[in-house]
Image (cartoon, coloured by chain):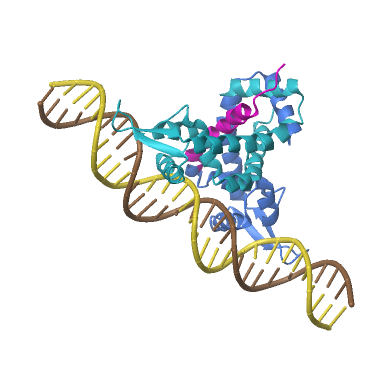
Chain colours: A cyan, B blue, C brown, D yellow
Amino acid sequence: MGKIDITKVWTLNYRLVVSVIGEVAPALHELGIEVKELFLLAELDAHPHPAALAETLCMPKPSVTVYVKRLEAAELVKREIDNADLRRHKLSLTSEGRKVMTGGLALLAEAFGQRLAHLTATQQAELKSLLEKLS
Amino acid sequence: MGKIDITKVWTLNYRLVVSVIGEVAPALHELGIEVKELFLLAELDAHPHPAALAETLCMPKPSVTVYVKRLEAAELVKREIDNADLRRHKLSLTSEGRKVMTGGLALLAEAFGQRLAHLTATQQAELKSLLEKLS
DNA sequence: CCTAATTGGTTTAATAATAAATTAGTTTAT
DNA sequence: ATAAACTAATTTATTATTAAACCAATTAGG
């Protein structure tokens, strides 16, 4: 069992990710959101404050500001002051926002699922387990 | 063996990718290149024409134009007319460009390798094999 | 209590990325 | 030959992203 080529593994995975994103982007655009906005919506329940979203999504805070502004203008996200800490903005999905998030994740799952379909159920579970160990 | 949650697998993997990129970006910047420029350099031997790079890297052609211009200005890439098809630009790494590419990939391998180190050699090989099936 | 240091978020100013239109060269079919 | 269709790459004009500087609220230490 020789050492694996790290760069090769990286490249395989990176291409997988960018190609799925490229595939899904036009359909998301129909839904009215950008790819990163979907990722933000998807994390909103778990991380309802801009700073936490920036941290989780590995993006700069000003980017979160911009996305949240747009999503708020589109009435997919609601912003309130957090009474526990008046600096914070407590974000939440509107019901329309939740619908768009669900629909967007379905599109993503469809595109990524087409790739995963090349694996057996056991292999899919194995992949998930390996990725969990990498976190 | 129930069905796996596709979105969960996606999220695990997406975060892995963006966090490795975020980790490597500052070091690459020291080297004088951006992350995507490294990916472009790394594909240059295999795909020496802009259109092929755009296709392989899933990026629009004008982006390739911009990156190649910068890399050429930095003397990391050389551009020639392809005598077999005069519309084409045949790109190649300069010796400095190859050095930078090698150094950049080493930084990437270091960062990604730290994650992979959470897996045994067998698991790493398994991951590689699964990703190959997904291509 | 104050003041300094931190944290949360935004704004501004600048750079990065890209869609749409364009130019240059090639191929195909008369 | 030559017009039409096609392919490679670039340019232009616009939008997206972000670093740096900022303001407001909070917390920690005298």
Left or right placement of residue C4 versus residue A85 in this view:
left
On the question of residue A83 being in view, the answer is: yes
What is the number of callouts on the image? 0
Instruction: Identify the residue at image location x=41%, y=33%.
Output: A91
> Which of B39/A30 is in front?
A30
| Above or below, C10 relative to B5 | below
Magenta region includes residue B21: yes
Chain part drawn in magenta:
B1-28
> Which of A63/B124 is in front?
A63
Instruction: Identify the residue at image location x=47%, y=26%.
Output: A46
Tell me residue A123's x, y (percent): 73, 23
Tell me residue B78's x, y (percent): 63, 57
Instruction: Identify the residue at image location x=76%, y=27%.
Output: A119
Tell me residue C11's x, y (percent): 32, 49
Q: Main secondary structure of the magenta part?
A: helix
On the question of residue A1 being in view, the answer is: no
| Above or below, D14 relative to C29 | above
- Residue furthest to the front in view is A95
Magenta region includes residue A50: no
Tell me residue B126's x, y (percent): 72, 23
User: If the image is split into quadrants, where does the N terminus of chain A sit?
Assistant: top right
User: If the image is split into quadrants, where does the C terminus of chain A sit?
Assistant: top right
Instruction: Identify the residue at image location x=30%, y=28%.
Output: A83
Left or right placement of residue A116 versus residue B34 in this view:
right
- Residue furthest to the top in view is B1
- The picture quadrant where one finds residue B115 is top right
